[in-house]
Amino acid sequence: MSGSRMAKRHLSRRLIATTAATALIAAGVLAGTASSANAASVRTGGTLYFITHAEQFDHVDPARVYTGRDIAFFNSYLFRNLVSYKPVKGAAGASLVPDLATNTGVPSNAAKTWKFTLRKGATWEDGSAVTCQDVKYGVSRPFATDVITDGPQYLVGALDIPLAADGSSTYKGPYKKTGQDGFNKAVSCKGSTITFKLNRSFADFNYALTYPAGAPVKASKDSGDKYDLRPYSNGPYKIKSYKVGDQMHLVRNKKWAKKSDTVRTPYPDDIVVRFGLAEEVRDQIILNDQIPNTINLDGLQPANNRAYFAKAEYADQRMNVYDPYVRYYAMNVSAGKLDCLDVRKAVFFAVNTQALIDLSGGSVFYGDPGDSPIKPVLGLDYAPTTGNIHDPAWDINGAPAKSKSLLAAAKTSCPTTYDKATNPAKGLTMDLAQSATNQKASVLIKQAMENAGIVMKFNFIPSGQYYSTVLDDTKQNDLSTVGWGADWANASTVIPPLFIKEGGFDLTQNWKVPEYAAFKTKSDSALNETNRAKQAKMWQELAQYAMDQYWIARPVFSKQQFSWGSKVGGVFYWEPQGTFGFGGLYVKR
Amino acid sequence: MKPFLEVKNLTVSFPTEDGLVRASNDVSFTVARGETLAVVGESGSGKSVTSLAVMGLHSRRSANISGQAILHLPTGPMDTISATPEAVRKLRGKSMAMIFQDPMSALHPYYSIGDQIAEAWALYNKGSKADGIRRATEMLELVGIPEPGKRVREFPHQFSGGMRQRVMIAMALVNNPSLLIADEPTTALDVTVQSQILKLLKDMQKEFNMAVILITHDLGVVAEVADRVCVMYAGKIVEQAEINDIYYKPDHPYTIGLLNSIPRVDQLEGRRLQAIPGQPPSLISLPKGCAFRSRCSFSEQVPDNRCATEVPDLNEKLEGHFSRCHLTETQLTRARSLAGSK
Amino acid sequence: MLKYLARRLAATLMVITLVSMSVFLIFDVLPMDPARLTCGKGCSPAVIEANRHRLGLDVPVQVQYGRFVKGLFVDRQYGDGAAAFSCPAPAFGYSFNRHECVTTLIADALPVTFSLAIGAFFLWLLIGISLGVIAAKRQGKWQDKASTAFVLFGISLPTFISGILILLMALKFRLIDPIEMGRWVSPFESPIGWAKNFIFPWLTLALAFAATYTRFTRSNVLETSSEDYIRTARAKGLSEKVVLRKHILRAALAPILTIAGLDFAGLLGGAIITENIFNLPGLGRLSIRAVLNDYDLPVIVATTLLAATFVVVMNLLVDIAYAYIDPRVRVA
């Protein structure tokens, strides 16, 4: 039943599901935004339900939460961070506002040092004040890699703490306290001011602090692994009960003071997340508006999704938006693989993009062809590229003639690779996660490649092992299907992860080719660039370079759909998190 | 002697996909209390079918039955063929009882001997379960089972074949029936046990003054217990007579054949037993004429090929001696002696 | 009899031990690597090794097994330093995915699965045996034909289809509250709430099983009816009702006991499909989600072992019950 469980966090919050995601949609239509005329009192009260097929939240422990949806959910209800995204629709949602801190952070020393000062009045469930030490303790937890798994590693990687020989931090977290001195130097409290010392210039460090991994944790309440079931709240709600496979029940945190919090607007009295619903039950609740005060945390199954979006009466109970992901085929450029530009281009032009989009739900629900690894939702960092899909010869249905001419060139420019790509006894191999949709996709791809004279073979990998297999550079084949989304509104969370070896998700293996050195140098300087406009320009140029090198094929800017019941108000799409702006949701009376 | 059971023109047939099987065809006989009638024949000759019809044990759905089987009860005569199933059921066990060929399979494997006998007793007697078991114990003792008090609690599989047949007899007789039908009661047993059971039957008959119908394919056992004999072949009675007449003056070539297949202690050494050659005819399509013709060594002696064209009637050739054969008495005498010297 | 019981009990324990060893061996040789699967983005070899240590997979399989067995008798310790904690004996391990001791997870799931199994069990026996007896008694008549149709329907319709159909109908006619459905309600607190929760799952399972039992009962009743001892029972003068109830059914249903016992044991291991369709948090859902979601080895091992144990133990119980029912199998 749940083969389509999201690909998940094993590597990154923004790593896409290995099986085709159900969803998505037309232009970024935002629906159901409440009229500001409604008085808050009209919105207050009631029970808001969330339903999902999932058995549980992947994680609840702030240090381990790593999917956009869960970050948005818990930041809205339970965890306050030093800074937060502004809970509004549109591009403005990607701007930072102070939350626990009095401002969005003060960088110094070329953005290698960041200071935040806590505001007064923020409290825990028991009424005790949220202190600088709490923040420091919270930040220390991700270093305990033997307890805190799956969480984002931005802080671990960025804080100026000595590394051990194997590349891991010498600080082993607050449980073992090994290397505690190193950590104390990197993160220090003076009164209510916390100072972070970083090992490099990190112009968008405050964005990394929007992750709950940078949120305070009260040391006396830390229960290690079990903290993932019952974290201590400093937000407007607290956990009344949470049972995996059953439900999570949030009730108002009486100790939360509205005046200490300029970000949150807690409307419902009760919030109940119901887990483990059969997909059919979940879909029927939405299709029949059976529980009107319900929000679907998942997508609907494809057929139900089409039916739901076809109904005019549900126009205000759905949205179809671009998700944070770019889905593409990474081309392995290492020697002996796709080490020939002409052959890579031939593959790029041969793909029948439209047929593949149609297979996954069509342009309306699945997405549009993209021209960059950076998605337009990143705003500043995206610029249309040249070449690739803008080449007059490119065709959304595949351009076999263009591919053939490129192959003809390859015959002389790189005969070995040409032979590999065209020789039926050899051929190129694509890695795919095992799924019914991918099985069908492979047939379409094979056909399109054949039309262009390219021989394509497929390596199906069980979806649970997909990424661990292809990320092993000795096991990865010529092409691998991938999806990636930015961790925050800066391509520093796109270009380095995807095209720099240390980024952790470089499936092009480009570090094995000569062009890499210059690329890395430029990427590093972009990371260190504190002038945001200059930085954006550099990311755009690097994206253009990656496209010119044809390191990726068939990029698709994908979409996702959301659905909810008729009694839910205040819905908007929170762009930086790629999900609902949970804080604004209320139950219509 | 006034008969207790009077069977008249009893015909039992079973419709099958291949056609109507006439298992028992126009059968008539009587048996009185204190008397033992042996019904003899090969398997498939209709003897069991006839007795089950009398007992009302054929499923009315699968069997077509016509004729009469009248029990002369103290309350008046009752035809078990035309009576309602419920009326016939109330005669079973009480007025007529039956024991079967294979005592191994005829007792319920899951219930103790005592339970099974007590269950039969409780049908026609008022009393507690303990009374039933006590009565069962008495019956076991009566039929010669040692340690009845202990064995009454045991299960069928703990008994030998002969003992089980004794149990069956005890169970059949627990309500003192007027008629006992014993269907091949000794066939499945060792020779030594056979005669014990036959003796027991005889003793019980005296004890309860029952009419007994002994069904068997073995003329040998008949001599020990029967007063009269019916020989059946292919669903019909072919000969019926006093026991001595059957043994010394068999009137039908089939009876003669049967007699020749009995091992006898008085027989001369070296004389071989004669099995009757051939197979009985199909009961679905009986041949025209005499059903035994194809196996009969004497049919050529009958003029005009009558054996092939004319079904012989059951004629009373001597008083009380009926036979269904075209041969004349003279021819038969020769046949008897011929068979004897072969 | 006591000696026999002791012997069977010893053999059963032996089988369970062997099964538990096999389970460990099987999951050891499978190519899945939970240490890798639960590793986050900064997945250096050091982190993977730390994970492996955390999950207790950094020692040879026989040591893992030893720890498992020890945990059944002695509290089991996890983690280091301030993050250390333990699962009280009998501990089947700890689920790092659900953050609970596996024993707790099973204790939570077991009543659900047991409720599902027991209700379905009685329902399908009732339906299956009644229909089977009626069909046998009315052999060839419309009742027989109707029951044959039911059998074909029940056998050919897979649970995941019949379950969804029943679910959709129940939803359509608003017979269940979709948001609350499947949530555990103790029968001791609210028998009605409990039964409401299970009625449709019971129907789903009963439909599938009843078909088999109808067919089986019918053929057994027919077969038994032609036994000599049934003729004997009739010859005694017993009424048809008594013959059927006391003589035919006793013998015809005895072999069904064996199958029913094993089917019941199988269900106790978890009715994966039905539990998933009806949101029931039972063992089936626990085990399948453990496989699908995170390759949660301790849960997979425990549920597999538990399912096998149910079957083995039920086998023993069935044999003992059978000896009670059929005196022929009783050991002298």
Image (tube, rainbow, N blue to C red):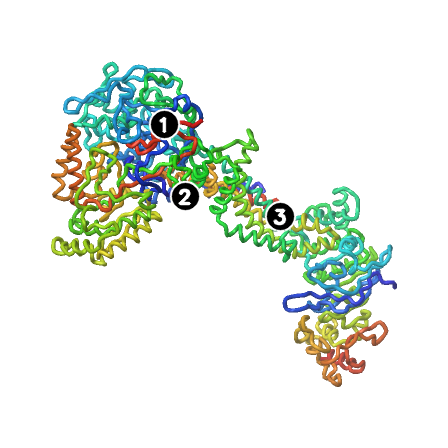
Could you tell whether A277 is left or right of A178 in the image? right
Q: Nearer the viewer, mark 1 or mark 2?
A: 1
Residue B73 visible in the snapshot: yes
Numbered tag placed on residue A307 in the rendering: 2
Return the residue nearer the eye: B36 or A111.
A111
> What amino acid type is highlighted by mark number 1?
Ser
Q: Is residue B195 above or below residue C331?
A: below
- Residue to which mark 3 is pinned: C130
Q: Position of residue B323 (x, y in %)?
A: 79, 74
Among numbered discs 1 and 2, the one appearing first in the sequence: 1
Q: Which amino acid type corresponds to the residue marked 3 in the rendered image?
A: Ser
Q: Residues within 10 Å of mark 1 (few under 14, many from 20)?
A: few
Identify the chain of the residue marked 3, using the numbered disc in the image. C
**Number of numbered markers:** 3
Alpha carbon separation for disc pair 3 and 2: 43 Å
Q: Is residue B106 above or below residue C4?
A: below
Share a chain, discs 3 and 1? no
State the residue position of label 1: A35
Residue at image location 27% in from the left, 17% down from the top: A118
Residue type highlighted by circle 2: Ala
How far across and down, in percent of the image, does residue A493 sit? Answer: 22, 34
